[in-house]
Image (cartoon, rainbow, N blue to C red):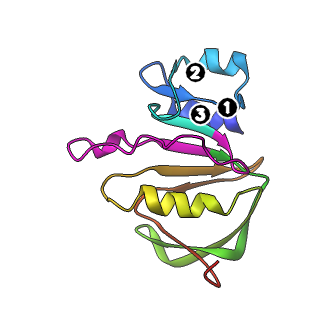
């Protein structure tokens, strides 16, 4: 699934960081995206179980669109669960259950997106599902954890 998702996002005009080497060399070559460090890249691929060692690009007030998109590979995405999503494009709220995601990701995401319109977008994917979480989506943990 990862190569398919990246093929819709990245191209030779974009930059990609893959600090954990989740993208096969042949797939990287087909994408043609330029390599960059995780704090500078437009797209950063990470396992959801591991937190980044650096802060991703969040854009500038003149160019908030330069905030990174983090592509997190997770074990499983299911409907229903303790992660509650709301905001533009969601008619009330939607709940998800994710496995293979360090809970600290949600605190980091909130911190990175606190200066809206600056921030990062997330794409979560498992073997069968993809969930895009633009920075405008609110993420709450049911029970406040």
Name which of mark 3 and mark 2 comes first in the sequence: 3
Measuring from the top left, give residue 54's x and y in whole percent: 53, 40
Between residue 33 and residue 101, name the one nearer to us. Answer: 101
Q: Are marks 3 and 1 in contact (CB under 8 Å)?
A: yes
* Above-or-below relation of 41 to 123: above
Q: Whole-Å distance between the Cαs marked 3 and 1?
A: 5 Å
Q: Quadrant of residue 98?
A: bottom right
Name the residue that disc number 2 marks: 31
Q: Are marks 2 and 1 in contact (CB under 8 Å)?
A: yes
**Residue 66 is inside the magenta segment:** yes
Measuring from the top left, give residue 138's x and y in whole percent: 47, 70
Name the residue that disc number 3 marks: 6
Q: Secondary structure at mark 1?
A: helix
Q: Are marks 3 and 2 in contact (CB under 8 Å)?
A: yes
Q: Secondary structure at mark 2?
A: helix
Secondary structure predominantly adopted by residues drawn in magenta: loop
Name the residue that disc number 1 marks: 3
Between residue 91 and residue 124, name the one nearer to us. Answer: 124
Q: Secondary structure at mark 3?
A: helix
Specify start and end residues of the magenta stretch as a single range.
46-71
Q: Quadrant of residue 67?
A: top left
- Label 3, residues with CA under 10 Å away: few <14, some 14-19, many ≥20: some
Measuring from the top left, give residue 43's x and y in whole percent: 51, 35
Q: Whole-Å distance between the Cαs marked 2 and 1?
A: 9 Å
């Amino acid at each position: 699934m990862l190569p398919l998702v990246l093929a819709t996002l990245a191209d030779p005009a974009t930059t990609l960081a893959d600090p954990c080497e989740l993208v096969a060399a042949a797939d990287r070559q087909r994408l043609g995206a330029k390599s960059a460090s995780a704090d500078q890249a437009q797209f950063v691929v990470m396992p959801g179980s591991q937190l980044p060692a650096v802060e991703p690009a969040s854009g500038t007030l003149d160019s908030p669109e330069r905030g990174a998109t983090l592509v997190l590979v997770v074990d499983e995405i299911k409907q229903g669960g303790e992660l509650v999503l709301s905001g533009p494009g969601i008619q009330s709220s939607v709940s998800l259950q994710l496995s293979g995601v360090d809970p600290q990701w949600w605190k980091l995401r909130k911190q990175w997106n606190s200066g809206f319109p600056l921030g990062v977008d997330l794409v979560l994917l498992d073997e069968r599902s993809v969930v895009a979480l633009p920075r405008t989506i609110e993420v709450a943990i049911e029970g406040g954890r």
